[in-house]
Image (tube, rainbow, N blue to C red):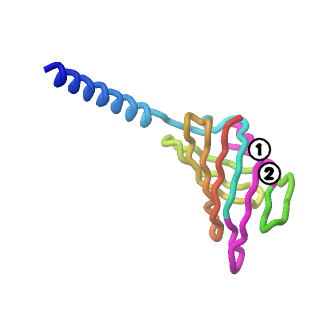
Amino acid sequence: MKRIVSALLGVAVLAALMIVTTTSAHAQSCNNASLTGNYGFTFSGFNAPGHGLIPFAGQGLMTSDGAGNASATFNFSEDGHIVKNNPYTATYTVNSDCTGTMTSTDGNADMSFVIVSGGAEVLFMCIDNGNTWILDAKRL
């Protein structure tokens, strides 16, 4: 009898934890202010201008103002050629489900993203045709 009561109690505790975890995971709501501050980032992928894939990777620092504006400076290697201190400016929109889009204002890449860990990290994907790359940004 004690084993049955212990087992039922264990199941009840696990069920309660699942409900709390599920509820808190869906309770997060975002807006433009959710993307505020300085973020260090790395990225890698391929560009496909014309024929063939050109590999590239880089790192940099992004600052977002919480009002829909972002800027960054980054270094990268494209097919082994190093480019330093490349500027990037963009506007962004964050949806209530913590997804969003970032649109370049200087001719660089446009991206979709998702804010995770309460804004501590942002996962980006380039949405320009011919490009396949991702970017991971972490709040400093």
Residue at coordinates 40% horizontally, 32% vertically from top-left? 21
Residue 4 picture quarter: top left
Asked whether residue 133 is drawn in magenta, I would say: no
Q: Position of residue 39 (x, y in %)?
A: 71, 40
9 to the left or right of 31: left
Relative to residue 127, is residue 27 depicted above or below? above
Mark 2 or mark 1: name the one nearer the start of the chain: 1
Residue on which disc 1 sits: 61
17 to the left or right of 10: right
Element type at mark 1? strand
Q: The N terminus appears in which quarter of the rendering?
A: top left
Q: Position of residue 119 (x, y in %)?
A: 60, 36
Name the residue type under label 1.
Answer: Leu
Say which mark, if any, is on residue 74.
2
Q: The C terminus appears in which quarter of the rendering?
A: top right
Residues at marks 2 and 1, CA–CA distance in whole angstroms: 6 Å
The residue closer to the viewer here, 24 or 70, is 24
Residue 137 picture quarter: top right
Element type at mark 2? strand
Please give the count of numbered marks on the rendered protein. 2
The residue closer to the viewer here, 92 or 13, is 13
Residue placed farthest to the top in the image?
A: 2
Q: Which residues are magenta?
A: 46-75
Relative to residue 34, is residue 56 depicted above or below? below
Q: Position of residue 66 (x, y in %)?
A: 66, 36
Residue placed farthest to the left in the image?
A: 1
